[in-house]
Amino acid sequence: MNVLLKQNPLTRLSFSGQGAGIVLSIIGMLVFLVLPVWSLLSRSVENKDGEFIGLANFAYYFQTPALLESAWNSLIIAAACTLLVTSSAFLYAYALNRTSMPGKSVFRLLAQLPMLAPSMMPAIGLIYLFGNQGVIKEWFPADSVYGAGGIIVGLSLWCFPHALIIINTALSLSDKRLHEAARVMGTPAWRRFLTVTLPAARYGLISAALVVFTLVLADFGVPKVIGGQFDVLATDIYKRVVGQQNFQMGAVVGVLLLLPSLLAFGLDRFFQRKQQESFSTSAVPYKPEANTTKDTLALIYCSVVAIGLMTVIGMAIYASFVTFWPYNLSFTLANYDFDMMDGGGWDAWFNSIEMAFLTALIGSLCIFLVAWLNEKTKGLKQSRNLLHLLAFMPLAVPGLVLGLGYIFFFNHPDNPLHWIYGTMTILVLSTIAHYFTVPYLTATTALKQIPNEFSAVADSLKVSQAQLFRRVTLPLSLPALLDISVYLFLAAITTVSAVVFLYSTDTTLAAVAILNMDEAGDTSPAAAMATVVFVSATVVRLIHSGLTASLRKHSQAWQLK
């Protein structure tokens, strides 16, 4: 192979091109991820005049009881949501993988509903259910839905599908032979659960818990809509930056928000390596046997959870068609006349569609090329390792922290890229940087499944890497590329955390419009905009499912044999 690389000028040319591509990818990650975060860290140790003052800002923060209380509130909310979501998602995933209950495919689809909505939508639904004028306000277990209780329930509903995906994957990879061995030895069902099922899924549970913890800490929408006077770190950043224009204290809160995310990221990487080391290629998939009692209990539990999700989302949709809640419940479309509301009008939705489309198109191509360069380039080991590390970094950087870092870095007059601030360009770039890691891992996994023999044959036939990429790699990776594009589209159309600091009057987004309308007291129009986003995301998801099925049927049939 080394001889071929030396003798083939096409290969040498492509290798040089790939090396340049890796360098450009590293520069891009530094500019759009590392330097903005560094700007945030630098601003946290400066005063308003830009002079270095050490840890004085942090000392002031920790000496102010009201500010310090926000940090404790965030940790309490994150811990409560992590416990609630991880346990409930595990039971749901257990029902899907360890029972023979009917309707599993339906329950899988229903569990994904919160992923198609902005995080504010569950909060709005909870207000119409349990708020001061809610239809069943007496049912809420806490004194009021406005506060810690509402935040916990709203964030738990929104995070539930994220945890379910991880835990469901962990349970689906369980080895049937372990269960059969325990059964043959006469181990009771409850003991098999404790000694076989839980240990096999422990890394998935830990990973899900860390993901939920990070998502809860970083989310801004739910606490803003339903938090009332209960402050958390995410809303603290918004108040310091937007309300008080105190960028130094905003940077301090951003750093405090970054620290637990970095810790969770490090723990997640550690446990994932443990999981990979314990995986067996000879594992036999588990197929549950019918058990009337267990199947019935699983069906009841999944039905309760699914009905809860549909009720909260459905309540927000219903409220968007009500004339004047709760005094006039007649049907109206007036709430959808966004041009008459304080939120950006229908242009906000069109901006979101444009931003999501550009993010999906540009992000999919760029991320796939980065993964291809890192996976298929020969040599440059240290550079590829650095690129791989940078590609994982977005998981540890909350959206609010990244958005605030973009303000400090790109809004600086000496930055040659200053012109992108306040434009659609910065919204697209920040969203791609924020959600980079999951698509990158998806692309890397798809590329690893392509045999290396293709590259060896291409070298022997003097076929360039560019031709190999166009004729072999790209067609084989089309399903993964479609998954990446729909993931980026859905993330872009529902996100609010990073872009809330970066939009201008000409680039207001639908998710931001929901916040603005809710803050102005137009809750029903906010529910209407959330409904429009939810329907848009659902339509795109259905189109993606149809395209994927058609692609697998016509051009990926070899995988089904």
Image: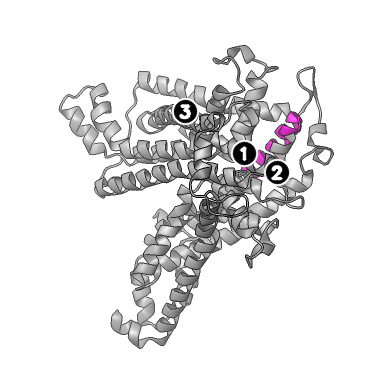
The residue pinned by badge 2 equals 510
Disc with the residue nearer the chain's start (1 vs 3): 3
Q: Which residues are magenta?
A: 518-539
Q: In the shown orientation, is residue 493 left or right of residue 369?
A: right
User: Residue 306 at x, y = what percent?
Assistant: 53, 27
User: In this view of the protein, can residue 474 be seen by the observer?
Assistant: no
Is 337 above or below relative to 364? above
Element carrying mark 2 = helix
The dominant secondary structure in magenta is: helix
Inspect the magenta stretch and tell me whether residue 273 lies in it: no
Q: Decide which of 94, 525 is in the foreground and name it.
A: 525
Q: Do tag 1 and tag 2 residues touch (Cβ < 8 Å)?
A: yes
Q: Decide which of 54, 136 is in the foreground and name it.
A: 54
User: In this view of the protein, can residue 235 be seen by the observer?
Assistant: yes
Colour scheme: one colour
The residue pinned by badge 3 equals 76
Inspect the magenta stretch and tell me whether residue 529 lies in it: yes
**Labelled disc at residue 311:** none
